[in-house]
Image: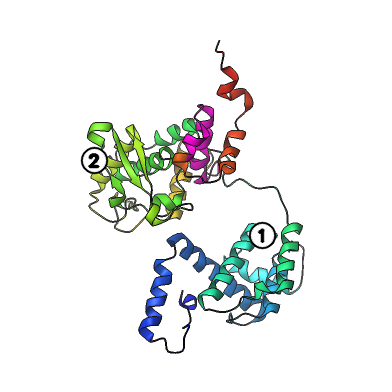
Amino acid sequence: MSQLQPLPLPSSLTPADQDALTDLFRRGTAENTLRAYEQDLAYIGAWKAAAFGAALAWPEEEAVALRFILDHARDLRDATGPAREAAEALVTAGLRRGYAAPAPSTMDRRIASWRAFHRMKNLRSPFDAPLIKEARIKARRAAARPRQRKSENPITREVLRAMLATCRTGARRDLRDHAALALAWASGGRRRSEVTALNLDDIDARPMAERGLIRIRLLHTKTTTPDQAPWLPLKEFPARSVLAWIEAAGITGGPLFRPVSQADRVLKRRLTPGGFREIVAHRLELAGYPRDFASPHGLRAGFLTQAALDGAPLAAAMQLSLHRDPGQAQAYYADVEITNNPAANLLGD
């Protein structure tokens, strides 16, 4: 992240002020955004090295920005020439999956990061030039495609119960997987980054004795900030599962979910979002589903789909899922087969 350090604004800015400014940028940026910045910076830097044989410049030249758009706005599977050669270098480095044109949203995210890097350095971005703006618009239109689901299938209640049923040996790994999956689904369909970011002090177990629930604090989500951190309820067996994991793992502070060794020893470090993805794939496979039946986002999709199947009001489901846009949440309700809609049976039998 060294290239992301802001440049001094006034010439009199001291080294201590510079360090304080860098620290402010880090503390004021969500962890997920910092990780995305790191990934995008690695990709952009590798692309320029492959395409121009040079390191990133600050500010970057408009010709480089335009070439980036052109290289990522077309299918390179049957192409030859410099764009294909740069793509081959990225594929070899594991930074690009293949030679098809990336989704417009992927290119937009990387450009947004590149622009953010310039702002951090108090520099003008080449992507603000009129020609570059117009090229981006044309690239989006040329690559327009139907919106793809983040998960092929929703993990509905039936699928989740089958996955949880595979966590029955009493080993710490099983207790962790049971707790993580149950929490992610029942608390409103949490994103994997939200699950793995939880710490022990984000769990309030005080209401358990009287009300049979615990509360979960989400410090970082896509729709809230730390000063707006919501406390969400987790009831019945999902709540008991989380408490059982905490006790069995001997967690007294720090990350809530952690890796477990082959010897069933709980490690001190935090479980990564990639580790949570592996939990989902592994439990799907043990439950008799293909590993790619659903991604971790299937937990979020499954919660909302199940809410629709059970006739829960959309507003009630959104209170837990923390969707701000009713249109996004409504899409899951719209996907429910109309004959399964509870409103189709209001008169009863």
Residue 77 visible in the picture: no
Q: Nearer the viewer, residue 86 or 34?
A: 34
Label disc, if present, on residue 102 of the rendered structure:
1
Residue identifier under label 2: 206
What residue appears at the point 22 percent right and 52 percent down from the top-left corner? 252
> Where is 101 relative to 183, above or below?
below
Calculate the distance from the C-alpha at mark 2 to the C-alpha at mark 1. 48 Å
Residue 109 is situated, as x and y percent measured from the top left of the image, at 59, 62
Q: Nearer the viewer, residue 13 or 66?
A: 13
Residue 210 is situated, as x and y percent measured from the top left of the image, at 23, 32
Q: Which residues are magenta?
A: 292-318
> Where is 45 relative to 346, above or below?
below
Q: Main secondary structure of the magenta part?
A: helix
Quadrant in the picture for residue 94: bottom right
Quadrant in the picture for residue 48: bottom right
Q: Nearer the viewer, residue 325 or 150?
A: 325
Residue reaching furthest bottom?
Answer: 12
Tell me which amino acid carries mark 2.
Arg
Residue 301: say if magenta. yes
Q: Nearer the viewer, residue 286 or 134?
A: 134
Tell me which amino acid carries mark 1.
Pro
What residue appears at the point 56 percent right and 44 percent down from the top-left corner? 151
- Residue 76 lies left or right of residue 158; in this view the side is right
Q: Quadrant of the C terminus?
A: top right
What residue appears at the point 55 percent right and 13 percent down from the top-left corner? 348
Residue 124: say if magenta. no
Label 1's element?
loop
